[in-house]
Image (tube, grey):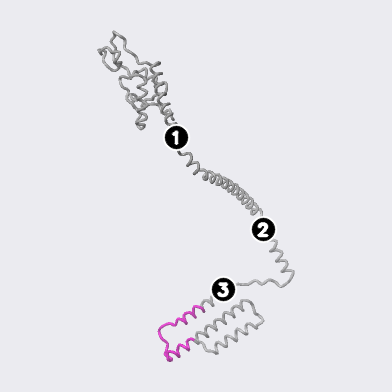
Amino acid sequence: MGTPEDYDRASSFSTSMGNSPDWTPVASAKCEMKQECVEVWRDVNVLQQRLQEETGDAGPTDRPSPLLAVSRAKQLQLQAQVEVLESQQPQLMCTHKKVVEAVLVNRLKESIEQLSELLPAMQAQQKELSASVELEEQVLHQRQELGRMLEARLAEVPEAHETSVDSRVKTFRRKLKQAEQFHTDLVQRLAEFLDTHFPPPQPAKGKRRRRHGSSPVDKTLDVDDPQWTPLNTMIETLINKSVDSPHDPYIPMEPRYWPPYIEMLLRCGIAQRHPDDSNRLKLAPFNL
């Protein structure tokens, strides 16, 4: 540890450095740091003396002192700061008035040029922000109008709901009955139309006719037991199949289906053949 004389010599050295004519900011900083080092070492010495007095002037122990480690760390930090300050070369501005004015004018010109280059970009950004603000205001106005309309409708809904539930149920039932009646009439009119314009072929009396797909020696057909299925029955079968099993709407062509009827349904676009099996038919999807 240092002695008080060493501390006094360091203090006198710092004072003499402060009074020297070659005084610079770097030297001032170095002097201040050295003064701090001297004060730290002085505190460490005082603490060390107190520690020795409390321990009965015992000799140095093997255990390191925490205060000494802290002091060494501070010393290293201060030395690093001194080295940084010594490595820097501060540039002092000339004290001549005209030189200072010229430097300031040049700096102002550079700042003005930079701001002039930045001004168009800022103006363009301001226009974009103004357009965005106007658009957001329009959207906000529209949403406010929509909100007021929805609030008005919402206020009317309970009253309308309470007063019109029964009337709506009655209306739906009336429309359902009308639809059922219309469906019944439509089916009846379709059956009458088909019976009138497309009657089933009747076998000739006294002649032997061959069934479709049977041998020529088949018996003579009776009027009460015709060979061919009526057209309205064929169409009804197609409709029922498409409604009952829409995943598989095809029906097989039975021998009792008259070929001219089948050809007519295909040519008129009422029925369609299966793409892989020509002996199966389905009702054309009129809703597509």
> Are the residues tagged 2 and 1 within 8 Å (C-beta)?
no
Residue drawn where x is 40% and y is 16% of the image:
196
Q: Position of residue 124 (x, y in %)?
A: 64, 51
What residue is disc 1 on? 170
* Nearer to us in this view, 236 or 19: 236
Q: What's the CA distance linking mark 2 and mark 3?
A: 35 Å
Judged by depth in the image, the label closer to the viewer, 2 or 1, is 1
Disc 1 crowd, CA 10 A, few/some/many (<14, 14-19, 20+): few
**Residue lying farthest bottom?**
56
What residue is disc 3 on? 84
Q: Position of residue 174 (x, y in %)?
A: 44, 31
Q: Earlier in the sequence, mark 3 or mark 1?
A: 3
In the rendered image, is residue 140 in sight? yes
Q: Which residues are magenta?
A: 47-74
Tell me if residue 94 comes above or below residue 167 in the rendering: below
Q: Amino acid at mark 1?
A: Lys
- The secondary structure making up most of the magenta span is helix
Q: Amino acid at mark 3?
A: Val
What residue is disc 2 on? 115
Q: Position of residue 20 (x, y in %)?
A: 65, 83
Disc 2 crowd, CA 10 A, few/some/many (<14, 14-19, 20+): few
* Nearer to us in this view, 214 or 61: 214
